[in-house]
Image (cartoon, helix red, strand yellow):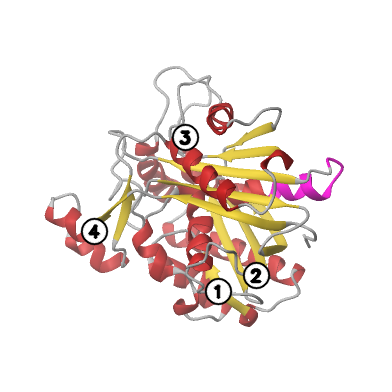
Amino acid sequence: MRVENVHINALGVALHEWVSAEQAVADGLLGPEVTAANGLTGTHVSGEVPAVDLAVSAARSALERAQLDPDEITSHLHSAVSYQGPVGSYPPGYIQRELGMDGVSALYLQQGCNGMLGSLEVAVGQLTGAAQTEAVLLTTGENFSSPDIDRWTGFDQSYFLGDGGAAVLLSAEEGFAEVRSLHSGLLPTLEKWHRGDGPLLLSGEPGSMADMAQRAQQFAETELSLSETLEKLSVFDLGIIHRALVDAELNASDLAKVVPIHMDGRMIEYSVMAPLGLPLSKSSFDFGRGAGHIGGADVFVTLEHLVRTAEVGPGDHVLLVSQGPGWICTACVVTLTDLPAWTV
């Protein structure tokens, strides 16, 4: 869809200690052959800081940078992949209480690593539709310091799981960047890739993220080979990306940067950059390879870095792309109109 009058007013990020892949190899947590193949250099680790507190920290940063009155915020969308609190709790309520917000509507989206762009899609509807919302806060937070999953190899060797938070403040009136277009879709043919053959009625211990690699392997053995799966999702994702570019009235060559999720550079090149006819150097891989895969936060953690360091500036078009189980894909084009005061 073509988008008008949706502005990114501020971005906030919360990242803690950085641990190098080299250190992980030295500690026996990772084989040197893995880093030699995937090109990833490290990730962020937050220890015992809860995921929701990382989201709160990122939101505070965004609110401090905001060009608008926080009282204008009338909607809050939170998304996440990992544990956010006990079953039955509502993470957005915790975040709003910590931020001192009151009377703000809240939605909790679970779209896996597509969560923040999925939230942006909902926010676009709120800002441009019947709700006539003036400002929307998007948040996410992840902490993968869990005994149930190995951050270095437990989520496929193409990713190092990272801890952190991200927040986006959207405005119908002003900001340093405009959302030009957004397109999303679902490829249900690959739904079982992440679900596996587990029961749909809870009768025992529920599955966890630690099982996901095993489920994917089972899918490759019984449903579709890995090469067929990658081919299907690549064609599907490219269609989503092309629609976002068409709606923004741009060609791939017009893009200053392509921001995918933080993963193996070979996957970025194969599934995103090469089909667009662009070199890997036009992607954000040089930053993402060391940031870690922070769920849905990846695209906005990277955009914040690109803006803060002035690697992109006024007039530059940036493509954000994320995916999630299901198989979900969302692509969004943003155009910078200014450099905010918090650039270095």
Q: Is residue 127 magenta?
A: yes
Label 4, secondary structure: give it.
helix
Does residue 223 appear in this view?
no
The answer to whether 20 appears left or right of 113 in the picture is: left
Residue type, mark 4 in image:
Ala
- Magenta residues, start to end: 121-131
Label 2 sits on residue: 336
| Distance CA(mark 3)–CA(mark 4) | 26 Å
Q: Position of residue 324 (x, y in %)?
A: 53, 49
Q: Position of residue 23 (x, y in %)?
A: 17, 56
Label 1 sits on residue: 312
Tell me which residue sits at (79%, 43%) in the image.
133
Nearest the eye: 340 or 188 = 340
Q: Earlier in the sequence, mark 2 or mark 4?
A: 4
Q: Are the residues flagged by discs 2 and 1 in contact, CB closer than 8 Å? A: yes
* Magenta stretch prevailing secondary structure: helix
Tell me which residue sits at (84%, 46%) in the image.
129
- Figure quadrant of residue 243: bottom right
Tell me which residue sits at (74%, 70%) in the image.
248
Label 3 sits on residue: 52
Label 1, secondary structure: give it.
loop
**Which mark is in front, 3 or 4?**
3
Identify the image quadrant of the N terminus: bottom right
Label 4 sits on residue: 21
